[in-house]
Amino acid sequence: MQILKPTINQTIQLSDSRINTNVSGLMQIERFYQRARVYNDININIGIKEMEWIDGNMSAMLGAALYRLNIEHGLTFSISFEDVNKKFPILFQNGLINTDAIKLSGSNKGSTIPFKSFMPDDKDGFIEYVLEKLLVHDGMPGFSEATTEKLLDYLAELCCNINLHGETEYPFFVCGQYYPKLGRVIFTVTDLGKGFLPKIKNKTAGEVSSARAAVLWAIEGNTTKLDAPGGIHLNKMRDFFLNHDGHLHIITGDAYYNTSHADSTARPDKIADVKQEFMGSTVHLVFNKNSLL
């Protein structure tokens, strides 16, 4: 069946500042999502003239928001080729924006780790991507075999958690970016499922009743699984990154956990309160090239 292209267009600015890998960056994308979701079956022109910066890895989060808007509201999207090419060519280079006018390199050179989506049950495809695009990227150190196996185990568990907790038929989205001046690679995984809370709340018979408590419950090593480690991997993953001068972010529901947050009155247990409705969960993995061996 052929779907006719909408003839109505509405311009919405993606951001009027910076989309970084933090609470503020999340809220910029959430604001765009909320402004767009009031429309149905039209084309949204994504305005970027006012945007100052976007972390390349945040393409995973943005791509997830655009997918949900397309599926649930029938929206299509356009963007100025000239503006992207002038200000944010990284969005061409990582594959978030596809165009025949840009020839993308298939190598692991440069700073981008490709934007891609996977179905929740496609563990093999995801692991192949991790092996061929993430762990061997120029921004990564030469991992030992033992460290490679450990990271594969952790990342495979992320995929399994999406399949288990998410309860969704929507794909999840990934993208990474190497920041040479910082010596860091940030890899982002965003899903459109139900998030951590529903499964954990059910497992604990209602004892865990908030997204904040669900994140803490999971990173303490608890699991909803009967026959597998589950949350133990999040616990070990957190310790692994902290022991190698990296960081772990987990966002689900209204909770944003970040190991780099100070444990304070404003952010108890390193968790900030956020308001977002477009995703189930996001995990940011911050690799420190100088420490990960």
Image (cartoon, rainbow, N blue to C red):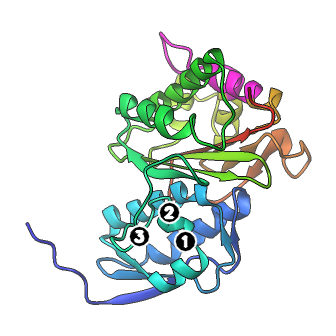
Q: Is residue 126 magenta?
A: no
Q: Which residues are magenta?
A: 219-240
The answer to which of 37 and 105 lies nearer the viewer is 105
- Tell me the quarter of the picture where residue 32 sits: bottom right
Check residue 239 for magenta coloring. yes
Q: Is residue 131 above or below residue 187?
A: above
Separation (CA) of disc 2 from disc 1: 6 Å
Q: Residues within 10 Å of mark 1 (few under 14, many from 20)?
A: some
Q: What's the distance in space between the residues labelled 1 and 3, CA to CA?
A: 10 Å
Q: Residue at x 50, y 35 (%)?
A: 130
Within-10-Å neighbours for mark 2: few <14, some 14–19, many 20+: many
Q: Residue at x 55, y 21 (%)?
A: 153
Q: CA distance from mark 3 to mark 2?
A: 8 Å
Mark on residue 102?
3
Which residue bears the numbered disc 1?
Answer: 89
- Secondary structure of the residue carrying tag 1 is loop
Check the image and report above or below for 40 versus 62. below
Please name the amino acid that badge 2 sits on: Gln
Crowding at mark 3 (Cα within 10 Å: few <14, some 14-19, many 20+): few
Q: Which residue appears at 53% of the width and 59% of the height?
A: 59
Q: Which mark is residue 93?
A: 2
Q: Residue at x 79, y 39 (%)?
A: 259
User: Label 1 amino acid?
Assistant: Pro
- Rendering quarter of residue 118: top left
Q: Kindly check if marks 3 and 2 are in contact, taking CB atoms under 8 A apart as contact.
A: yes
